[in-house]
Amino acid sequence: MSTTAELLKGAAELFPDEVVTQAHVRHLDLPKGAGRFALITLDNGLDHTKPTTFGPQSLANLNVAIDQVEKEAADGAIVAAGITGKPFIFAVGADLKGVELLKRHEDALAIGKGGHDVFKRLSSLAVPTFAYYNGAAMGGGVEVGLHCTYRTVSKALPAFSLPEVFLGLVPGWGGCALLPNLIGADRAVSVIIKNSLNQNKQLKGKQVFELGIADALFEGADFLEQSLIWTASVLTGETEVVRAEVDRGEAWDAAVARGKAIADSKVHGAAPAAYRALDIIAAAKNAGSAREGFDAETLFDLENVALADLIMGGELRSGIYSFNLVQKRAKRPAGAPDKSLARPVTKVGVVGAGLMASQLALLFARRLEVPVVLTDIDQARIDKGVAYVHGEIDKLLLQGRVNQDKANRLKGLVSGHLDKAAAFGDADFVIEAVFEEMGVKQQVFAEVEAVVPEHAILATNTSSLSVTEMAAKLKHPERVVGFHFFNPVAILPLLEIVRAEKTDDASLATAFAVAKSLKKTAVLVKDAPAFVVNRILTRFMGEIQNVIDEGTPVAVAEKAVEPLGLPMSPLVLLELVGPAIGLHVSETLHGAFPERFTVSPNLKAVVEAGKRGFYVYDSGKPELDPEVAALLKQGDSVLTEEQVRDRVLDAVAQEIGLMLDEGVVAEAQDIDLCLITGAGWPFHLGGITPYLDREGVSERVTGKKFLAPGIASVPV
């Protein structure tokens, strides 16, 4: 049996580029004469923009620090030990860069065992241990603290989570075993399953305390000082830490059942991580309480095996791939011009004052903090649009997200004017969000070009029309760019930036600079019909509609794609987008690619009947609207769920292959980034191309995989 040090040394050889975290031990005298104290500080030597992580060498360094503290505790040289992080950061978990490189199950197993072997030593010292969550704590950063006797948390802590299930893992260094035994199974399920599957929702410091994860809450300014004073009071008996009794009866089983229902609603059984985590939480019920002699080792073994199995699985590789797309590729958009070419934007114009235009005005005002002026065809519409923006700012004020002064300033930035010349005469960036019809948009651009400065960018929020054609009649088509947002604008990060045939680098660079200021994920796309997301979704939805039109029952067609674990079913998505918009995009694409894109007569009938969707919700869940059912005219070709799924995935793979051949985006990675950030497709799919590769669809349809070996898959 190898020692922990040997285990970590072997694992470190697999992580050659690890950013190593040091574990510095210093000693101090606690207040109130409580005694000598050893404090371990985790620090990778970099500033807070490079958070502290745990790779094998980092774990080995912590292990050495604990060696020292353990001896001091045994010798009576210290009365307690603590662990904290560098400024603003406690620790954010495992080094995922190394996890990507693992090729063998036994190596993955060693990572789980190595973390457990180091962390659990904190719970077996001869003195009490204290974790001081001073800053961001995620994954293994949370878990190292769970092994301590007591925990404090800063009110200023911005992010605290166990995000592993979100990525395709389980909290594998004690999270599944220890958290439910600390705060109860129901609260643990919320942290481990619900928050993770809710776009990796983060907890703030106060919430960490209220959940019972931390025993004390202190202000950020003097957090460590107050934590040490509190530590002294605990050690001297002045403060008694009382924790709620954990319910190990039916409530535990109910919590696990709730977790399964949450997982089913989010991933529909398509990704195993949540279910593996719930299995361990269920097993933790019978592990006994701390007073009864808690059987941690059995649970740690379960975590080790689950972690290793998932590390070697496709969903985790897709999850890491997705994480890298969102955190890295998104920050360096492929094909973006030199940012030094960007021109400053000190005023923004918005053509239109409807809901989308008003959402854009709010976003520009909040992020750029420059004047924003709306125009429309009459004053009443303009007033309504401005009132909407002001009302949304008032909501932000009520929610405490802005103060009164900020709210007043933001409202003052947003105005409306009927005269485009007066509105846009000094604007640097004007975006149109009017009716999706080419003639209307060309007329708007002609009117705007006549009154804006020569340097002003003209942007269109079109979802499917040709930006090149829109700019064709202008004197300066080189300053026209596509700037396609996704609804709801405040939530979905994607911004498709479309380069038309004559768009110049300066205009494009300015568009990317504005996108960055708006905190959007910008992806450069070619001026092709429906660009990326709408083209793929329309092909996807089109095949669903085709099989329904041909005779497959609606319920079968919907259920067929559940194994993908999409955020919502195709027809619920259609309802969200709006059947009329869906029909318009399908007509646009049918005009461009009639051999692949159809216009569903049933969808047309639904739109003409004024229906907002296929479903009614009278029973609290979606059921086919009887009026819609009466409109449907179907053939007699009935497919099975598997046949529907194959047909839909084949269509999507074909379309992606064609888009890559056409150069709509630089690489398959950009398509996946678009689907994750613009359509909310889950991390465990990696967007879509890793899933298509893993399931053999890519090779069946295109003759090759979309991604190279080792990208979103186990390295060869």
Image (cartoon, rainbow, N blue to C red):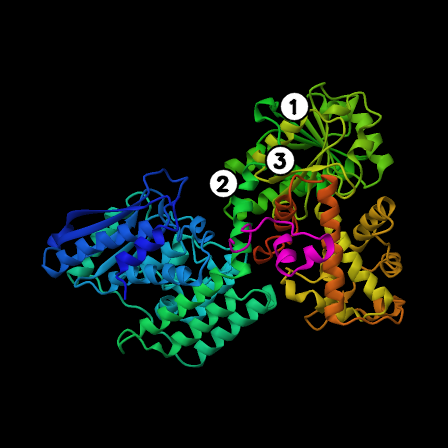
Which segment is the magenta one? 689-716
Q: Is residue 557 left or right of residue 27?
A: right
Separation (CA) of disc 3 from disc 2: 18 Å
Q: Quadrant of residue 510?
A: top right
Residue 355 showing in the rendered view: no
Q: Is residue 324 above or below residue 259?
A: above
Amino acid carrying mark 3 in the image: Phe
The front one of 138 and 213 is 138
643 relative to 47, above or below? below
Instruction: Answer above or below: position of 439 versus 288.
Output: above
Number of other residues with Cα within 10 Å of mark 1, as a class: few under 14, some 14 to 19, many 20 or more: many
Q: Which residue is mark 3?
A: 364
Query: Which residue is at the front of the view, 233 or 441?
Result: 441
What residue is shown at x 63% (from left), y 40% (from top)?
Answer: 390
Q: Residues within 10 Å of mark 2 (few under 14, many from 20)?
A: few
Residue at figure coordinates x 65%, y 57% from the top left: 692
Indicate the amino acid at tag 2: Asn
Which quadrant would residue 661 be assigned to in this image?
Answer: top right
Q: Which residue is mark 2?
A: 403
* Number of the front mark, 1 or 3: 1
Residue 506: assigned label: 1
Q: Residue drawn 52% across and 36% down?
A: 406
- Neighbourhood count class around disc 3 (C-alpha, 10 Å): few under 14, some 14–19, many 20 upward: many
Quadrant in which the N terminus appears: bottom left
The amino acid type found where label 1 is placed reads Ala
Most foreground residue, 506 or 12 = 12
Give me the C-alpha separation between circle 1 and circle 3: 20 Å
Measure how far apart labels 1 and 2 are at the Cα level.
Answer: 36 Å
